[in-house]
Image (cartoon, grey):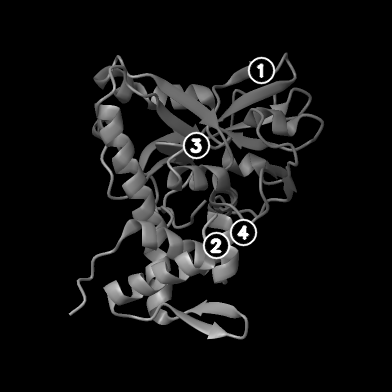
Amino acid sequence: MPSRQINLARLAHFVTVADAGSMTLAATELHLTQQAISTSIRQLERELGVALFDRVGRRLELTPAGIALRAGATTLLSAARSLAGAAADAARETPRPYVVAHTPAITSDEVFLLLAPIREALPGLPIEVHQTYPKILHAGLLDTTFDLGLRRGVVPPTDLAGAVVSYDPLNIAVVVEHPLAARNAVAMSDLASHPLTVWAPPGSSFYTDYLLSVCRRAGFEPSVHVNHIQGTTPATAVIGTDTFAFVTQETGITLGGRVAIVAISDAPLAPVQALWLPHTHAQPLEALLRGTVERRPAPLSHQN
């Protein structure tokens, strides 16, 4: 009767073979002999009592059992790395920095405010904050480069855990020459005749699709312009254009007098989602979730 126990080293070998589609390529990547990799895979199959690969020509393809194992392998290996790191951190005299990554849709000021529960609960904990793009944030959480991710979203990826920790009211950014720039506030209906700048094409980003849904709920389909300068403050997206952009920055004149941030009188709320490795525990994350004050706007149904 198979023990159904998984050896993590063999599981890591399996993942490399599954992704490479070849024992030879996996052995080269891992700096091991092909025989060592082949033996490791056979032992894993024996432990689990299932075949993991079929040979199709020169390529190895996953069996249904192999597909199921590959689907959960990354999360399990990441959680094991995180657990080993937590054990090592517990023995340190000084705490390791808690590393937080955020996407450009959330400003560094907003991140600082969001992390207040962690600073209050763990005042001696060093915190590092990095801005990065969604794909890099996702990969960095899985390889334990980052401890916590923050993005605009509501549905976590299947291999990460998540929770919405904040909702921020949307304002608009326009250049100071724009006809809406002098307003104290605008209604959503006032935006219908003006093009909207977004940071990713429709269908490729939760945040883009969410912003389009905000317009549709207000009764109009916006003309969309995609900003090709990534990673700068969101308000910079409108410079040199006649567009508006949804932002969460405070109202007022910014960027050396070039851009006006104007309030929306019936402001929609944009979600901030925290992401982390499932099956892991950390005091900073627990402090963040305890300190979260939930607001309940209209339900959202997309993913970043």
Q: Secondary structure at mark 2?
A: helix
Front position among marks 2 and 3:
2
Q: At label 2, which amino acid type do we have?
A: Ala
Q: Residues within 10 Å of mark 2 (few under 14, many from 20)?
A: many
Q: Residue at x 52, y 63 (%)?
A: 33
Q: Mark 2 or 1 closer to N-term?
A: 2
From the viewer's perspective, tell me whether residue 87 is left or right of residue 72. Answer: left
- Residue at the left extreme, as displayed: 1
Residue beneath label 4, please? 203
Residue beneath label 3, please? 267
Q: Mark 4 or 1 closer to N-term?
A: 4
Front position among marks 4 and 2:
2
Task: Classify 2 as above or below 88.
Answer: below
* Residue 119: mark in rendering: none
Residue beneath label 1, please? 254
Q: Secondary structure at mark 3?
A: loop
Front position among marks 3 and 1:
1
Q: At label 1, which amino acid type do we have?
A: Thr
- The x, y position of residue 225, in whole percent, is 75, 46
Q: At label 3, which amino acid type do we have?
A: Ala
Front position among marks 2 and 1:
2
* Residue 27: mark in rendering: 2
